[in-house]
Structure formats: C-alpha cells, structure tokens
Image (cartoon, rainbow, N blue to C red):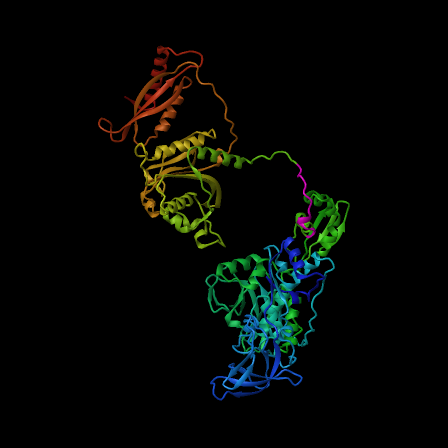
Amino acid sequence: MLLSWNWLQQFVSIPAPIDQVADRLTVTGSEVESLTQVSPKVSGLRIAKVLETKVHPTKSGLTVTTLDLGNGERRPCVTAAKNVTAGCIVSYAPSGSTIADGMTLGFRDFDGFTSDGMMVSAAELGLPELSPVHGILLLPDDAPIGADLKTWLGLDDWVIDLSITPNRGDMLSYLGTAREIAALIPGASLHLPELRPALQQPGDWSVQFNGVTLEGDGCMAYRLGAADSVKVAASPLEWGVRLCLSGMRPVNNVVDATNIAMLALGQPLHAFDAASLPAPEITVRPARPGETMMSLDHKERVLSDGDLVISSGGVAVGLAGVMGGQNSEVTESTGAVLIESACFSAPAISRTSRRLGIPSEAAFRYARGVDPCLTELSLSWVKALLSQWGAARVYEKEILCQKKPFEPRRVFLTERKTALLTAQPDLAKTGKETLTRLGLVASAESAEGTEYVVPSWRNDLSIEEDLIEEVARIHGYQDSRPRIPELYGPGQLGEFMSLHRQIREAAMARGYSEAITYSFISPDWLQKIDYPEIDSCKTLTNPISADLSVMRPTILPSLLAAVSKAEKRGWRDEIRLFECGKAFVPSPEGTVEFDRLCGVVYAGAERRRLYGARTAEDFFSVKADLLALLVSRGVRGTFIPASLPWGHAGQTAQVLLNGKPAGYLAQLKPSISSAWDLSAPLFFFEIDLAPLARPFKPCYKQSGEFPPVYRDIALLADRGASSEAIASEILELGKPVLRSVKLFDLYCGQGIPEDKKSLAFSMAYRLDDRTMTDAEVESRHSALRQALEKKGYVLR
C-alpha cells in the first residue's frame, strides 16, 4: 500500500522522523518496501495568472501570453497548449526552475517573441495521473498568485510503500496504519482528521425507496445514503494529489469521494446513479448461474451462484465488493446518487475476484477483512466531502439493513502462558499496557489473567496465542533475549506417519523414487484413462486453475503426468515412481477419502547396456515389488484376475489383503499409453493403506534344523482358476508337515482340454524335531493326492 507521509500525519502525531518510523514498522511485521521522495527534482515552480493571450503571428499553433506572478511581477511565456485562456490560473516554471525530469528551464526565442520558461502539465510535475486533460495543469481561482507551486500542491512529501501481510487487513488504510504507528512510536497520538460536517437535508428520501433486502449469508450489513443535485466534475487538486500519491487515479468528485474514504478508513464504498437503477430497491443476493453483467471495465461477466451481486428490479447492477456495473455508472449526466457502504463476506468476495480476474482495490480489502463497524463513519466521510466540495446536496436519512449487530470477540490472556511462549517474564507484566495501545480493552481480571475485548478492526485476533504474539511483536523480536528451549520427551510418529515412512523405505529399497503431487488434477487426465465416473468426482469451488479443479479419485493420473512429462523432455531410461497420498472416491453416500499407495514402472526407450540389453520389466517383476512392500508390513497379498478400464486385458489383477479387495496391479492399456504419449509399456499398482496400518513388529523365526523332503505334483485346473489360490489350498490340506508350495510349470496346449490348464507344483515336507522318512513322506503325499482328487482336481 502507498501512503502519503503528509496525509498520514493528519491521522497521527508522530514525534519521530520517517526513516525511524519505517524501521519500526519493518521489524514489527509490516515491511516498508521503499521510501520515495515526491518529485525530488521539481523546484522553483510558481502559481501564475494569465493576463492576456494572442496568437503568434508566424508560428502556427503557438500562443503568446503575459503571466502575472503577483506584486506587479509579469513574465512573457509562449505555449502550444489549447486549454490556456486569459484569466485562468496556471502552473508555471520560470527560467532557472527545474521540472520532474531534471531539466532546468531558461529563455527561448520564438521568431521574435521571448518565452521566460514555460507553463507545465501534471506530467512535468511528476504526477501524470493527476489531470486527465491533455495540456497545462490549470489551478482553481483561489490559488495564491505567485506562491510556490510545489508547496501549495503538497508535493513536499514522501511516499511509503508498505507491504501488508494478509492477516492485517486493518492496515490497508491511513487510519489503520496510524493506529499501528501510535502503538509502536512512544509519544505518538492518534486522531481523526477534521472534516467540515456535511450540510445535510432533513428530508426522508427513503419514502420513495422500497428499501434494502439481504439474501443469503454474503452480506452482514448494508448501509445506503443518498445525494441529489449532483454536479459531476473534477475533485479539488489537493485531494487529487492525495489520491495519486496513494496509488489511485482521480476519476470525478463522486467516485473520488468514495475512494478517499476507503483509503482513509479502510471501508470500500460505491456510488450508483440513482436514475439508472431499474427499480427503487436494492437486493444483495447470490448470482443466478449463467447470469451476466457488464462491469465498469466494459467487459461482460458471466456469473455463477458463488458470486454475490447487487441487484435492482432483478437486474444485477454491481458485483458486490468487487466492481460496479456499467448500467449504474456515475457519469457527467448523473443528477442523483445512492452511496453504498457495506460489510461483505471475505471468502465470497475473494472467490469472485479471483475467478473473474478482477483485482480491484475494494476486493483486495474485503478479502482480508473489513471492520464491520465502519459503514456509518465512512458514509459520513463521503457525504461530508461531497458537501464540502459543493458537488451534491446530501441527505441525513440513511437506510441500514443488517443480519445482526456486531459482537466483539473476548480473549482470555494469562501471564503464565505469555511468559512460557515468549521466555520473557517481564513481557507478561507489560502485556496489558501493550494491548491497550493496540485498542484492546481489559473487561475482566482475575488471579489467573485478564479478559480482553478485541476491537472490531482486528479480525486476526481470536485466541490467547494471538495476543501473546502482539505483545512480543510490539516489544520487538530483535530485542528478545536468546534462551535454550526447554527439553521435552521425544515425540512419536503417528500411526499413519509411521506406516508411510516404512512404505517409503521399502519402496526406495526396490529402486523407486518418491513423487509428491497435488491431490487435485485436471478432468482431462481422468478422461485420458477412461475413468467411468468423472461427473461424480468432487470438484473445487475455487481452484488454483482449470487444470487443477477435480479431487483425484485415483493417484495414477498424477504419476502418469510426471512420466509423460519426463518422456517429452527426452528421458529414455527406466522410471520407477511411487506416492503415498490421498484419493477421493465418489460413492452413493458422498466422496470418501482414502490413504493410498500408488507405484508405476515405465520401461523407457533405452535398453542398451555394457553387457547386453537390459531386461524389460514385466507384470511379474512389478508384482514382486508390490509383494516386497507388503512383506515389509507383515501382510500377505493374493492376486486374482480382474478387469479395469485403464488396465491391459490379461495383465490386470485385483489385490486382496486379508481376503478383502484393496487395489489393483496391471499393465496400462496400450491405447491409454498412446494418449499419454508413452512409447514403452507402463506397469502400475495402487492399493489402500488402511489394511497395512495394523501394528506390526517383525519377529525372528529359527530356520529348520532338519532338511526338507521335496515332492512334485501336477494337476489340471480350469483356465480361469488362480494358481495362487490352488497353491494356498494345497498348503492348507498338507498342514502341518507341508511347509511350502511353489508353482514351477504352467502348460496349455496339445493333450490338454481347451478349457483347462496344467499346473505343476514343487512341495517341501519337513518336521521340526527330526528328518522325515521316505515312508512318512509318501504316506503324507498320497493322502494329499487323494484329498485333491476328492475336490475335483484331475492329477497327472
């Protein structure tokens, strides 16, 4: 925020130089980006009156004038400006003076006519925004002839560029910054500038107006004032200069009055052309989806139901807290105005401003929180300025519509907590004085501490720690004494944090790299994997961008995007990525949030190696990776054939953990690989982490002292049967002496029925206390074969 040092001192008496104030503001959290002297090179300029003018006889477009500088002093001056006439008061730079660009003026001859310096425009004073008229800067008739122009305009000034943190919306005004300085600088005292009270008309204009209606929760309070006999013109130069130095462009007296009140007090205001309103009423309501409005910047805005509008007769005449509508704009023909002073919802204004890309001064303040008790004072400022400038006849009667009166927050502060968090017992004792300087009021005291009433303008103070921060901040962090912190017992990782850490370590041990991506993705990514329920996915109301607008139902697209990006940038080697993150899966009851693990293995285009081509990854090697991750948590996983919209047919398996579905393992469907511009196969797995979250402690188990005895068995099974399920069944039938069952051969072909397949298993029999005899093994193995035949298996 830009602040005029001279204007700021009308709000607070400051017994300190500007550089000291800037340093104090910076060290307490409100960083001063720069201190800039206004028009430092301008000197020697004066106020002059044009006595006479005549056209130059030989130079087309030039006018020869005689200027009066008071006390009988007259100077000749030649100008090309078209707005100079006899009797007007002008800005004059005589010979020997210097203008904003550093040029020193002298005498100049124009075909026999000497010009002593020149008349100057606003740009040559260093303030091009001050006057919209191209030509000489004309001054009011009561400007003192001969006086120093720079001093009279108030250009002997400095501009403070103050960087306001997002939580300090109260400092986005001269009054708010003055409050802060009054609390920081010893001896500084706060006071509001005196404005001459408005000459208000006693008539009740509201009898012809049907009132104000608030719909929804977007507006807490709405105050409306009125003025007629409006004469739209330029504002007095004194106020125009203040606007320019504060970073705003003068528009006209009505608009400028609202902007001045906003800069001074922090409350945005807006003026409507009363005659342009479709109906004698105002309604603050949510916009209708698809509703349109032409804003003041001449752009048609398409609104959504998240936007808040000011409407009249059902027609939107303004985007609440953001920008007015062109259909109610104040113009030179305006005869009566309605002046809005309202308190709108910060989130609603912020969403609309960001979505439509309208970073207006009003929206910037509303998004950071506006004092809900300022509507009356700020409206009185606008009425006082319009009356003082003779710009309108203002009415005393105002309309106020509010949801409920403001209730200040109350926060309890203890000396013990202050001493604990600041490590400075002295601060705990001086905290009351500090908080009182900041505008807080002690409402109750007890042996434990003090209850404070938080002022309406400090919406960032809500808990005890906020008050302690204020005490420490005003004292100065740089003055805090260093101290060794108290040592507490070692912290412990939470259940899921511990799980994530173990999964990360196991995945990295298998050669995977961790990826960290956003939990929200582009809907196009879901279309590219043929996700079937895109319309059911949770969407963000206020996304960072259109490409990050959907809460992802699966982590896979995030990793596919990373692999695809690497491929496009020329990466040719294998890529192994994993992510432990959130997935938001749509269900009939709503969106369900899951913690998941997702991994991808991309073969890459480069296969050459020093000792021969690199072996390509396949479904089973990635399955081995997933099994290793599961074993690290003491969980056995089983896999059954399955189908998945983005999984390759015949290369897709459902993962069962503890007998329940927990995820998938698959090769990415080739058509989807092409959609992601991948030139090599990609394998992936994605599982829920909840089944792995149970407490697990690895235990040592002694290996068998006696050797196992091996036997093989071959059988016919249905083509679609799971070999893993059959192995588990054999192991269960052979307990307790059968210790392992491993598939070593799979055959489909000649001699085998088309709907069958031949599976061969190697089995290990072993006892813990002795070596089994051949007779014992044959007996057990024969019993196992008979049990399998009873279950319908054909043994080979």
Which image quarter: residue 575? top left
Q: Residue 452, percent across and down?
A: 72, 52
Q: Is residue 591 left or right of residue 609?
A: right
Q: Is residue 256 left or right of residue 293?
A: right
Q: Which quadrant of the figure contains the C terminus?
A: top left
Q: Is residue 91 left or right of residue 59?
A: right
Q: Is residue 479 magenta?
A: yes
Q: Is residue 461 magenta?
A: no
Q: Which residues are magenta?
A: 474-486
**Vertical arrangement, residue 481 with respect to residue 242, above or below:** above
How many tags in the picture?
Answer: 0
Name which residue lies at 55% across and 60% down. 349
Residue 184 seen in the figure: yes
Q: Which quadrant of the figure contains the N terminus?
A: bottom right
Front residue of 718/119: it is: 119
Front residue of 130/523: it is: 130
Which image quarter: residue 743? top left
Name which residue lies at 66% across and 47% down. 465
Residue 306 seen in the figure: no
Which residue occupies the extreme left position in the image? 750
Name which residue lies at 39% across and 47% down. 565
The secondary structure that most of the magenta stretch takes on is: loop
